[in-house]
Amino acid sequence: MKSLILILFSFVFTILSYCQSFVGDWEGTLKANQRSIDIVFHIKSDSKGSYSAFLDVPVQRAFNVAASDVVVEGDSIVIIIKAVSLRFVGMLRDNKNMIGNWKQAGMTIQVPMKRIGDGTNQKTFKRPQTPQPPFPYKTEEVEFDNKDKSIHFGATLTIPSTGGRMNEAGKTVYPVVVLITGSGKQDRDETMFEHKPFAIIADYLTKKGIAVLRMDDREMGKSTGDFMSSTTFDFVKDIEAGIDYLKGRHEVDIRNIGLLGHSEGGLIAPILASKRDDIKFIVLMAAPGLKFTEIMEQQNVNVLVSQGISQKIIEDMKPMLRDLVNTIITAPDTSIARINGIKIFNAWQENQSRTVVKNTTGVTDEASMNNYIKKMVFNLNVPWYATIMKIDPSIYLGALKCSVLAINGEKDIQVDAKTNLAAIEKYLKQSSSNDIEVKSFKGLNHLFQHCKKCTFDEYSDIEETIAPEVLELLGNWISERVKQ
């Protein structure tokens, strides 16, 4: 599950390019909620005059976030980045200056941009694990619809070239795994900081004789739908559409269908598997075992610890954060939520120093406090948040009948390994499943990378995308469950 910080700063960009004048590296400072955030757009043009754009937010260690649409009309440019729900509209003042409007999370912020390069100053990353063609298996780009044809999905299906079994019709069929992404809009590879963990997992499993389907989330890649109005239960239906598609493929062994979910995907998997009889196994990677309200509280604690905040300060903050969240999600409307939220926050900060308040919440005055509460109310009332806050994973984990592997990295600061794996194991033991394995990996973070600082900032700095020992366990465990 991505951090609250990462979710709040998801972006969608639309850029309008003005001939060659827009091509270049553009830098600006986004000022909001008493914070200044530097941003950089890298705008390019090909020989046909088509434009592309990439966003950097260095303070968040976000680089090369690709725009899904770039439109140029005269001296204006629109950049849309669906992955982060952000729209930027810019107007050239001259060849070195542009004024833009940044639209995100219900806010519009004006931001001046200055040209600082020729468009070639993008940060480069080494990602040695990302699979490169030619592949020793069949890779097929596929598209399909859900049952009522309201959403169209884009996906990649990889099919082994060896292994499998002969079915009753005399055709070779292969076990298959559907990969399920974590929270926030994700492409089929679950790309983050140019890491492509799902591409790597698919490559590894397919080489071991297991077919893999990985899907674009709603509004990503070739998938349609309205992501912002969707909830976890909607995403469950999306994965069901993927299963229905697979059951129509002659290469798929319908007796051996499994699910692998990362983060929120590790919640979607048991919800789906608990109501179907055709799921042979599920793999839960950094999945929630606790309610999301508890996870968010622990997540904030872990983040503050990683930033060097003392345990005493954190313990003083936890009750305030818990009351604030519960008050907002149970309020009859957003106005009352804001009023009651401000009361709770003021009561807490009266007993804290200004330094403590600033370091833990970023609040420095009444205006920034109002913005802090307003943003929290806004986010907690987005359909996805409002729904997931009320989901109890124990209900679905306890109703499982299939084989289950649950893993996490002990250095995960987003979904705490110790508390969540303990909860998952507890509820699985109450289920009808008689094949359960729970494992914590030493030294690994939320993305299952070997980490040193084990902070959000380090995700992009680490060359490794996923630890080899994790891939080995996934491959061996799944292979054992699909033996004929």
Image (cartoon, rainbow, N blue to C red):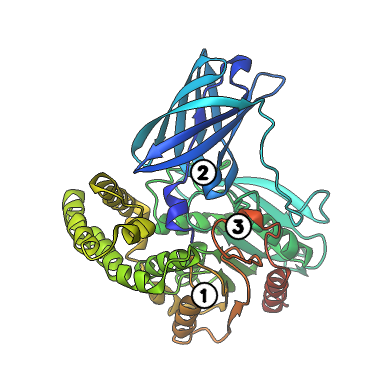
Q: Earlier in the sequence, mark 3 or mark 2?
A: 2
Q: Could you say where residue 341 lies in the image, as x and y percent from the top left?
A: 21, 57
Front tag of 3 and 1: 3
Callout 3 crowding tier (Cα within 10 Å): few <14, some 14–19, many ≥20: many
Residue 301: image quadrant is bottom left
Q: Verify CB contact (< 8 Å) between mark 3 and mark 1.
A: no
**Residue 46 in the image: x percent, y percent?**
69, 23
Relative to 59, say whether 295 is above or below.
Answer: below
Tell me where residue 360 appears, x and y as whole percent.
37, 60
Circle nearer the viewer, 3 or 2: 3
373 sits to left or right of 134: left
Q: Estimate the spatial distance between the alpha carbons at disc 3 and disc 2, rounded to whole Å.
A: 18 Å
Q: Image quadrant for the C terminus?
A: bottom right
In the image, what residue type sits under mark 2? Ala
- The amino acid type, in three-letter code, at marker 1 is Ala
Foreground: disc 1 or disc 2: 1
Name the residue beneath numbered marker 2: 83
Is residue 117 in view? yes
Which residue position holds label 1? 417
* Residue 430 falls in image quadrant: bottom left
Q: How far apart are marks 3 and 1 (CA)?
A: 17 Å
**Image height of 311 relative to 189, above or below:** below
**Mark 1, secondary structure of its residue:** helix
> Circle 3 sits on which residue?
459
Vertical side of 319 occupied by 181: above or below: above
> Image check: 254 left or right of 38?
right
Who's the residue at 70% across and 69% down the image?
A: 471
Mark 3 element type:
helix
Indicate which disc, 1 or 2, sits on the residue closer to the N terminus: 2
Q: Based on the displayed image, in which of its 4 quarters is residue 450 positioned?
A: bottom right
